[in-house]
Image (cartoon, coloured by chain):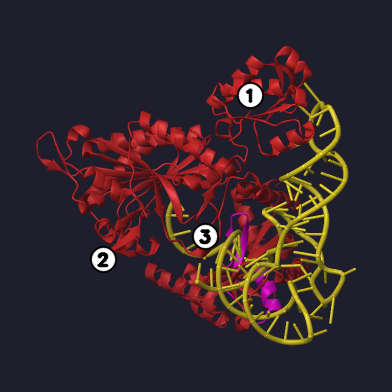
Chain colours: A red, B yellow
Amino acid sequence: MPGYETTAAAREVLRHSTAHVLAQAVTDLWPGARYAIGPPIEDGFYYDFELPGGARFSEDDLGRIEGRMREIVAEDQPFVREEHTIAEGLALFADQPYKVEIIEGVGEAAEAEGVGEGVVSAYRNSDRFVDLCRGPHVASTGKLGHFKLTKVAAAYWRGDERRPQLQRIYGTAWESEGALAAYLHRLEEAEKRDHRRLGSELDLFHFPPEIGGGLPVFHPKGGLIRKLMEDFSREEHAKAGYEFVYTPHLAKSTLFEISGHLGWYKDGMYPPMEMEGATYYPKPMNCPMHILIYKSRQRSYRELPLRLFEFGTVYRFERSGVLNGLLRVRGFAQDDSHIFCTPDQLAGELADLLSFVLSILRAFGLEDFEAELATRPEKFVGDPTEWDTATAALREAAESAGIDFVVAEGEGAFYAPKIDVHVKDAIGRRWQVSTLQVDLQMPQRFDMEFVGSDNTRHRPYMIHRALFGSVERFFAILLEHYAGQLPVWLSPVQVSVLPVRSDHQLYADSVASALRAQGLRVDVVPADEQLGGRIRRAKMEKVPFVAVVGDEDLANSTVGVNSVGSTRPERGVALVDFVSRVVEADRSHSVKG
RNA sequence: GCCCGAGUAGCUCAGCUGGUCAGAGCAGGCGCCUUGUAAGCGUCAGGUCAUCGGUUCGAAUCCGAUCUCGGGCUCCA
């Protein structure tokens, strides 16, 4: 049955089976080791262990373990299924407390469902090794073999910090050597487009230790890219009827008491500062301040919807271990907007908003979206009918935007249902970017109101949304998506003009002037080093257009063009044509030259 | 925060079974070369080997602590 092995289900089976082999190898090498769970995951599997005497794995152990695994594979041990009553299962795994806990859980579930005392299954490979498991498995260990252990880590039992910390080993497993090699190659490719690596290679940003973890500085080129992103965003927001506001980075504790952040978000906030008898906090969100702008005077229904926009820098305390380049930082700018509207404007506003969000993401070259509609969780505050109204409006927006969306039942924040927009990047990874929330709490907490056409006071609805999410994070996602080769409109240097010899310098300058006159960003690199070297440097700096000018070009008003995405350089391109070509690539947000 | 791993020149790394081990390439400065599509040649300068403490006659190398970074757990933009 050719091809069968490559289905997702088949891979899960072989990964899960490989995890069993890992557990057997570890229990062979560390007699008395306890094994907890070992599920298949995307691209591989892991298994959690507790080693005797609190021993820990180190990366050097992986080779030994892998060696023992290969012996087990060579022995071609069968996976034999056994079924046991709960009592038998507890006896069989009496010295495996984690298995005991799982079996007890199965027993309780069976009881709760009234299906008797319950049955557990186990798979036996040999007299020495049997593992509690639902199955299924491959027929025998000999069917496995295309695997590699990748890393060791600590993980808490059942993901709970208060429970014992276990030793986890990650691995990857595939149906063939070719598939394994392809996967390892993919990992290398992903590493090459790591935004942290590109950030230093392209001189875009860094994280000075003197400033502190998770607090980046943007260099001139990174700053230029960021400015281009922000300028574009501002223009589009202006067209879409947003108004720009600015708010400070600090506020008294009073504000966050009213907003409720000190109640439910304190762990995510920087510690307070005392000044003149008052307590100040760096803001973790911009919404309370935007609300104060709304509340600065009485509002009429005639001025709604009111759309306030700000690149607002917020500070959130993140535990040191979770920081991750620009993807996870402690201080970042949200492209934050709060829309205040009347109840009957809500649905229309959400629909417009979502299509606006998608149009901006598309302008950045992201095409593959998936939305997640997160609905009311079990623990929630507010009026259930308002929840229903808001959720229905979000659903309508998702439907009218015509994008794929899944409903994440009960996944909403406790104060708001939301739509999260995920994008898929060039190598298929999914990133959460935009979020749209209908806030059911803040308007009440701040006692917001507007005067309606009936001349009485009403409570406005409030939509909270971030489009990039965070500018820093979006910047990183773009860098990884494009592997550093940004579209022409976002490239810090769009054209590098290279005179072949010094006596072409004047002509090169005039080419640069012609381009700059169109608002393009151009460098001229003098002929102090050989042409090949300068071309190489421009290519490594990911400049989309390299224009070489020499004797022939000087004579004919042409340039030699070496552009990104084309396989061979062109000669004798008329300067006017070249200029309009670059202008077009810039205007159309094209990646290619 | 917890577990694992790593910190040697601006960058990438070698040296790391303790004794010419402070090195290479790139980048940078200076000089030469005047170049037609991804590295021209020469030369110079650069490091308290993350920090602090310990073991030793002797530490980049072994041990401990701290800091920073990376991979996980948890959480999220």
Distance of label 1 from label 2 (alpha carbons): 59 Å
- Identify the residue at horizontal 62%, vertical 45% (top origin): A203
Q: Secondary structure at mark 3?
A: loop
Chain letter behind tag 1? A
Q: Which residues are magenta?
A: A21-47
For mark 3, does the 10 Å Cα neighbourhood hold few (<14), some (14 to 19), or many (20 or more) residues? some
Which amino acid does the dot numbered 3 rest on?
Answer: Gly
User: Which residue has dot 2 on it?
Assistant: A277
Which amino acid does the dot numbered 1 rest on?
Answer: Ala
Q: Secondary structure at mark 1?
A: helix
- Taking the image as shown, residue A565 lies to the left or right of residue A235, namely right
Chain letter behind tag 3? A
Does the rendering let one see residue A532?
Answer: yes
In the displayed structure, would residue A508 be above or below residue A43?
above
Which amino acid does the dot numbered 2 rest on?
Answer: Gly
Q: Nearer the viewer, mark 3 or mark 1?
A: 1
Q: Nearer the viewer, residue A136 or A297?
A: A297
Q: Secondary structure at mark 2?
A: loop
User: Which residue has dot 1 on it?
Assistant: A512
User: Is the C terminus of chain A in the top left, top right, bottom left or bottom right quadrant?
Assistant: top right
For mark 2, does the 10 Å Cα neighbourhood hold few (<14), some (14 to 19), or many (20 or more) residues? few
Q: Are marks 3 and 1 in contact (CB under 8 Å)?
A: no
* Magenta stretch encompasses residue A492: no
Q: Are marks 3 and 2 in contact (CB under 8 Å)?
A: no
Where in the figure is residue A32, as x and y percent of width and height?
Answer: 64, 82
Which sits earlier in the primary sequence, circle 3 or circle 2? 3
| Image quadrant where residue B47 sits | bottom right
Chain letter behind tag 2? A
User: Which residue has dot 3 on it?
Assistant: A213
- Identify the residue at horizontal 27%, vertical 44% (top origin): A462
